[in-house]
Structures are given as structure tokens and as C-alpha cells.
Image (tube, coloured by chain):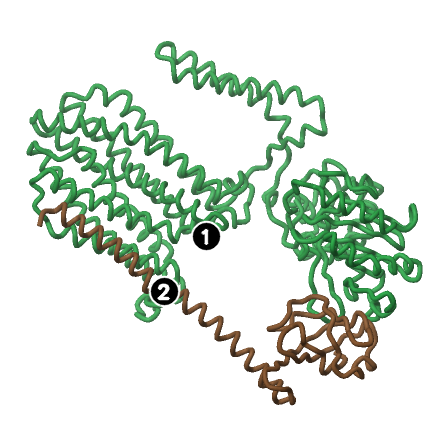
Amino acid sequence: MRALLLAALWLHLASSLLLMGAFFMLLLAGAPRASAARRWDQAVVAGSRVLVLLALGSGIVWLLVRTALFESRAQAALDPRAVLRAVLDTWPGFVWLARHGVLLVLAAFLATRPDVGERRNWIAARAEALLLAALALALVSGSSHAAAITPGTLRAVAVDVAHLVGTGLWLGGLVALALLLRAAGRDDDAEARAYAVRAARRFSRAALLVMIVLMASGVMNAIAQVESIAGLAGTTHGRLLLAKLAVLVPILVLAAVNRTRILPALSGPDAMRRLAAFVALEAVLALVLLGLAAAMTLTTPARHGEPVWPLPFRLSLDALLDVPATRWRALLGTQLATAGVVGLMVSFLLRRRRAPVLAGALALVAVGAGIGLPPLVVDAYPTTYRRPLVTYHAASIASGMATYHEHCAACHGAAGAGDGTLADLRSPPASRRHAGELFWLVSHGTPARGMPAFGGRLAERRRWDVINFIRLLGAADASRTIGRRVEPDRAWLVAPDFTVAVGPMAPGALRDHRGRRMVLVVLYTLPGSRARMTELARSYDVLWIMGVEVIAVPRHASPEAIGELGSSPPVLFPVVTDGNADIVATYGMFAPGPHAELLVDRQGYIRAIWEGATGGMPQAAAVQAQVEKLNEEKSPPPFPDDHVH
Amino acid sequence: MPVWQVALVLNLTLAVGLALGYAAWGRRAEALDREFGDARVQVERLERERAACAAGARAGEQQWEGRGVVRAIYPQLLVITHEEIRGLLPARTTSFRAAPPALRESIRVGDPIRFSLRGTVADDAALVALERW
């Protein structure tokens, strides 16, 4: 079923693109006078009549198959009500309707066979057909992957339209040009040959421009849809794109040969026939390229996929941090490689002695890569770029902590700091590994070093929980540098999210405050904290006006927690009455002791920590002074990711 | 008619067709959406008014139901952290006038409660009934 969908889509796209490019080529060549040129013009128009019918037919097949897939039953394709629903009630269906409406108008226009003897009429007829074909093609973007990008939908769609229309101009132009060259090469008509040569030169100039637009829009599309190297190498969508690029290389080589070698010497019928053959070959490769592009539109964009890293290694600049001696090597290698790339560019500009310069440049690049890359190589696994299944949340961390103490602490030590017999989890290399790599190591173990595999023993969620906890171990260790004073513009310690459950009401979350308010997380124990809690209740209105929400978390969950704080002065900030153990376990890692306060900025980073055990209770004025510092910050960092890395 | 004129007419027709299509269909869909939203708000308001009437309120008054936790008790006011009260307030902490002062005698700070409010707007909505949740 999917193969049929792909075939229909390919045929539909190919005929739409050829249709548009054909009329572009006709207009580029100009109104024909010689009889051979006239015959070519007639043949192209006759061909376009077939193409528009093909586009309509394959479009209808595509719609029927898509309806069947959409309703996940084959009979739906022939059920008029289901098809009507797919057309009228879905956005892609609506776009389909508009596109095929335009194609129908085009078909009717082409069927009229008007008299185009006068030059003005010829131009009007061909330009109108070009306009309609371009409109039909541009509408394809309306329901493409680009239309699903938010924010910036309009920009993404505009880039996609440029890519599609550019492809149409280039591919359709190529096919029409090949036909013209063949016709002119066969005839012994000098006028027709001159016409063909002029057309080929004009197309060559236009195609260069179109190719630049195509590459620019292609790169922008790829950045929007693939986003990362991992997406490119590790997902079906990304690999199709790589295949597409691989097909593009011979096309560009062919185009370059045509432009620089054959086109300048285009005189006799032989050269013309050879160029026709080369151009036809380029067009066939372009149709293969189109097949890959069609397959890409039917796969999930790489940015939504789960990449499976195909190589046993990856390159990472972090690797240099651990072994300072390798930095020089990497630096030398990159310098050499850069010199090689410059040499490559120079060799393309040279007219003489190009071959030795080219060879030397390539050798430099190879040697540079050979010297510079090995120090950057670190181990990688198929799951290296997997996104964690669970977010960095107190509930997950607490569950991970329990699992860790049960299964991991015996070897890695209770603090994970190498106090056991196995690796230190808080410092490099463990701390520099991607979460996905830790997941692989936890799941499959490293038998050589005595680490068992937990893939069969712990459910996937629990393994991710453990990884969240390992990240917290590292973060808690590093958090000792965060004191009672906010360091301006230094936000790095992500506050783990937690659930704020006040009484039996629908619970909220810490992250609900992101972008709106700072949060003072207060972990307290009665009766020791009573004086400070009273002071907080009194100064709550001031804190609120300064942009702070206070969330109080008693060390033990109790439905009576609010009442226990007393009613004079009234306590109006949220007091968590459920799920406290998770929060205390998580935030207690940053600040152990009976009373602690953590100031979280608007972006969701912990910026100051007051710990009752060391230095006594925080003063209201001291807290407000730090809040003021945060209010003065001009350029907030981006929101932290919900998952660990 | 020469082809260039046909092409011109065709383009004009396309442009006019698109404009008319948007005017007739796109704008009507937007208007219908708006009307639907307005109607739903009105239905909710009428339903609250009917509920209030059934509970013996004066004409024009509405009734709202809410759930929350008591945070502070004053002689005339109750401060309640509440969930969203549909048609009146989002989830937040609000102080409400207690219409029968006796209401506050049955509760303590920290109690989860369900409550009924009656009034015409948010500013004059007063607590008319509450019970432990």
C-alpha cells in the first residue's frame, strides 16, 4: 500500500515538475520560427497535455490510497463518503482540492489549442500555462512537512515553495532542452540549430541561478527538518537525504561538464547529439533524485525520529578536555585540513597545473584529518542520540535513586563518586557521556570491566530513572559552587521539575512558572523552621510583587501541613501536601539539612541556595536582594531542556 | 478573442475566484467560530442563572461551583486557594465574602472544601455554601 502511495506521489510530482519546466524552457527559448523549432514547440505542448492528465490521474490515485491508509482499511479507498471526508475535512485534502482545481483549469486551457501565430499570443499562452503549473506545484508545499513547522510556518513554506519551483524549472527545463537538442541535431537546418544553441546557453545561465536557489533552500529545509548530524545519519528520513545528496554529486559533475566543455563547442550535429544524451542522462538522474525526495515526504521528519547512531564512534570536542596534550595535535590537524580546503578552492580557479594542485590539496586534507580527528574520537553506541523516555523530574529521580541503591551502589558507591570498586559516575568520562550512551551501558553492561547488563532486569523506564539520578549526582556535586549570592548571568544548574500538589486539588508543576515567575523552593521542618515560615508568610506579598512565587515543601507529606503552619499571619503560598518524599529526596541532594531555600529563576535554573544547617536561616532582606539581582538580568538564557543529555 | 486576452481574463478570474472563495467561505467559517463561542458562553451563563434561581436567588444572579483549600479565615472573608471556577476565575488564591457568617465556623485553615458562590460578577460573588471535600 505504501509502495503504491510512493509510486503515485512520484508520478504526480514528476509530471507536475516536468509540466512547469517545459513551459519555462519554451519561454526561455523564445517564439520559434524555424520549422524544426516549431515542431519541437508543438511536441512539448502535446507532451504537456499528457503530463497534466498524468498529474491529475496520479493525484486521484494518491488521494484514494491515502484515504485507505488514513482510515486504515483498504475498502475506504472506494467508499465515496470516506474519500469525501478526506478531501473536505482534512487540511491536506483541502490543499489537494485546490491543487487539482488548478490542474483542471490548466488541462482545459491546454485542450483549447488556440491559434498562437502572433508572437504576443504565443507568449501569453505559454506564460499562462507556466503560471498555472507553478501555482499547482507551489500548493504542494501547503500540506508538506514544511507546513507543520511552528513557529515560522510561513518562512518554512516559502523556502519549500522555492525548492519545489526551482526543481520544476531545472528538471522540466532539462527534459524539454534534451528534446530540442535531439530534434536540432537530427535536422540539417542551420536556423534550428542556432535556435537550439541559443536556448541551451540561456538555460545554462538560468540553471546556474536555479541551482544556487535549490541548494540554499535545500540546506534551509534540511536544517529545519533534520536539525542534527544524528538525525541525518540515524533516521530513515536523514539517510534518504544522504542518498539524495549522493545522487546530486554525479548530476552536478555532468552539469559542470556540459557547461564548461560541451556547450562552448556546440556547433555540429554530433556535439549537439552528445549534449542531448548528456542532458537526458542528467534528467534521468534527477528523476531518481525525485523518487528519493518523494520517499522523504512520506517518512517522519528526522527531527521527530529517534536516531539510531550507525557508527561505533563519534567526534567530540569534549574529548580534548581530558587529555590536554592532544589539543595541539587536533589544532595542527585542523590547520592542515583548512589549508587543504583553501588549496582545493584555488585549484578550481586555476587554468593550468590544476591536477598537481588538486592532488596536493587533497593530500593535505587527508593528512590533516588523519592527524586532527583521532584525538576527537570517542566511543558511541546505537542509542547515543536517543532522547530519554522520562523527563528530569523529581518523581523519576527518586525512583532512580531507589533503583540505584538497590542495584548500583554496591559497586559504584552510595555517592557514585568512585567510592565503590567501579567507575566514578560524577566525573569524566562518565559525566561527559550522552544520556543515550549511559542508557546503552546500563542496558548492555561492559563485561570486560565487570559491569553487568541490566537490560533484562530493569524495565526501560527504570533504566532512564537511574540515568536521571546519575545526572542529579553530578549536578549536586557541582552545585556546591552555588552559594547564597546570585552570580549574574551564570545560569547552569537546572532545577528538576516536580509536582505541586496542594490538598486534593488538581496538581500543578514547578515548570508552570517558567517564563513567568521566579520560585523560592522552601524545604522546611517544624518546629525548627517556624520563625522563618512566619517571616515568609508576612513578606509573601512583597515577594509576589517582586515576581516570586514561594512553594513550601514540608519534609513529610501530610494533609494537615497547611493547618500546622498556623493561621496568624495567614500562609497564602502553596504548601505541598503530597509527593513530598520525591521533592525532598531530589532537592535534599543540593541542600541537605532540616531547612533549605533554593531560588529558581524565571528560566528554570537554580541560582542561589540557602541552607539552614550552615549559616543559619536566610533573612528576608537577603533573599529579596538576590531576587532583585535576578530582576536586573537583561538577557535570560534559553529554557533548559526537559530531558537530560 | 486572441490568446493573450484569454490569458488575462483567466488570471483575473482566478484572482477574483480566490478572493470570493475567502470572502464567502473563509470569513464565514471565522464568523461561525466566533458565534459558536459566544453562544456557548451565553448557554453557560444561563445555566448558572437557572441554578441560582432554583436555589432561591434574585433575578440576574448566577451561581458558580468551586473546589479549593482554606488558607485564612477573617470575620467577613475567607481566603481560598482554588481550582479554576468555570465562567468566573482561573485557578489562584482569592478572598471571598462569606454571605452567612456562620459558614466559617465549620472549617479550619488547611481544610479542603467544595463551595458555591452567588453573585452577578466576580467582584460581588459571595460564598453561600461550603462543605468539606
Q: Position of residue A386 (x, y in %)?
A: 60, 47
Q: Which chain is green?
A: A
For mark 1, name the chain: A
Query: Which residue is depicted at the point 59% across and 26% down?
Result: A373
- Marks 2/1 in contact by CB < 8 Å: the verdict is no
Whether residue A423 is visible, yes or no, is no
Residue under label 1: A148
Quarter of the picture holding the N terminus of chain A: bottom left
Of residues A550 and A8, the one nearer the viewer is A550
Q: Which residue is mark 2?
A: A86
In this picture, residue A583 sits left or right of residue A524 = left
Single out the mark in the foreground, 2 or 1.
Answer: 1
Q: Which x, y percent locates residue B25?
A: 34, 64
Q: Which mark is residue A364?
A: none
Which chain is brown in the picture? Answer: B
Depth check: A125 or A443 in front? A125
Q: Mark 1 is on which residue type?
A: Ala
Which of the two discs, 2 and 1, labels the residue nearer the N terminus?
Answer: 2
Quadrant that contains the C terminus of chain A: top right
- A555 above or below A225? below
Q: Position of residue B63 (x, y in %)?
A: 63, 81
Looking at the rendered structure, the kind of residue marked 2 is: Ala
